[in-house]
Image (cartoon, rainbow, N blue to C red):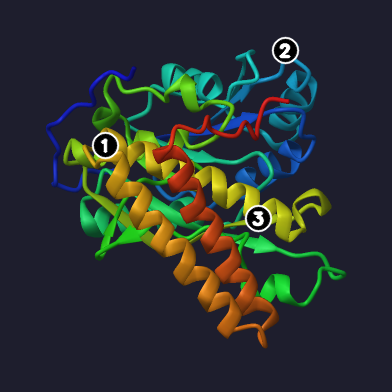
Amino acid sequence: MQNSAINLVSTQPDAVQDVDVCVCTFRRPQVADLLASLAGLQTPGWRMRVIVADNDDTPSGRETVEKAFAAHGLDGRYIHAPARNISVARNACLNAATAPWLAFIDDDETARPDWLAELIARRDETGAGVVFGRVEAVYAENAPAWMPAADLHSTPPPIRNGEIVGGYTCNVLIRRADVGALRFDPAFGRSGGEDTTFFAHLQRCGVPMAFAEHAVVDEPVPESRSSLNWLKTRAFRAGQTWGLLELRNGKSKATLTVMSMVKVAICLGMAGFSFWSQAGWRRAIVRSRLHAGVMAAATGKAPLELYGA
């Protein structure tokens, strides 16, 4: 499936001189806005190169990307990585990266000027090999009131018992030496969850991880994702990924099924008790779908394919 990551982790801070910022794109003109924001980053004492991997069947994004490189004076490389499988694009970025540090950011986000500097500062403070930032959802003015109140589109780091578990590629800095030969699993490239499994593997290899609260990127929420149904579907798929990880880690199908059934029931009960809160009951319902996804994985249901259509 995946190759092993390097298991030797340096905890000594070293000067960051070169960073490769990696972007995977698929038919999103918004990538031009992202590249413009990267050109405005504060880069004290280090150099940045931008790698964009286009996952479309044809190199449909080349013109947009290369025009943005030229317009903003970015040191950039465009790669055509076809397959409509996000793991293929992410792996193309890893294969093209040469800097000691690399960062991932999504093509529908924009980086705040201090984004990368904050990630690097947190890395220097902690000695971590992986540093996650925060993704802040930007809601349209006509979004229903419950949506920004619930804020289910923003992405915080997944934390269990005080430790980061799994992870995401929408805002992260990674020491390339710690990645080694590890690559994103194509089996999750259409369903999503390839980043969760990737970072879970790094964690098992002992790579320390940290969270940079002030390393923020902004992600506008499009109309296609402005619904409870979309949030429920995404949560269900995330639960499936987590369930598969738990099975790989040795948890029995029976135990996982029973635990997830209990958690679904608890979440539904919480939804009932919080019916007076438009944001509260929706949070509980979305959470119940995550645990339903875990149960689906335990009972053998194939992962939903959210990407590559």
Mark 1 highlights which residue? 202
Q: Is residue 3 above or below residue 140?
A: above
In the current view of this chain or complex, which residue is farthest to the bottom? 276
Give whichever of discs 2 and 1 has the lower sequence position.
2
Q: Is residue 146 above or below residue 100?
A: below
All told, the count of numbered labels is 3
Q: Residue at x 68, y 25 (%)?
A: 308
| Rendered image: mark on residue 231 | 3
- Give coordinates of residue 243: x percent, y percent: 39, 42
Q: CA distance from mark 3 to mark 1?
A: 27 Å
Residue toward you, 100 or 229: 229
Q: Quadrant of residue 106?
A: top right
Q: Is residue 23 above or below residue 288?
A: above
Tell me: 16 left or right of 67.
left
Identify the image quadrant of the C terminus: top right
Which is more foreground, mark 3 or mark 1?
Answer: 3
Q: Residue at x 24, y 42 (%)?
A: 251
Residue toward you, 206 or 258: 258
**Residue 196 in view of the camera:** no
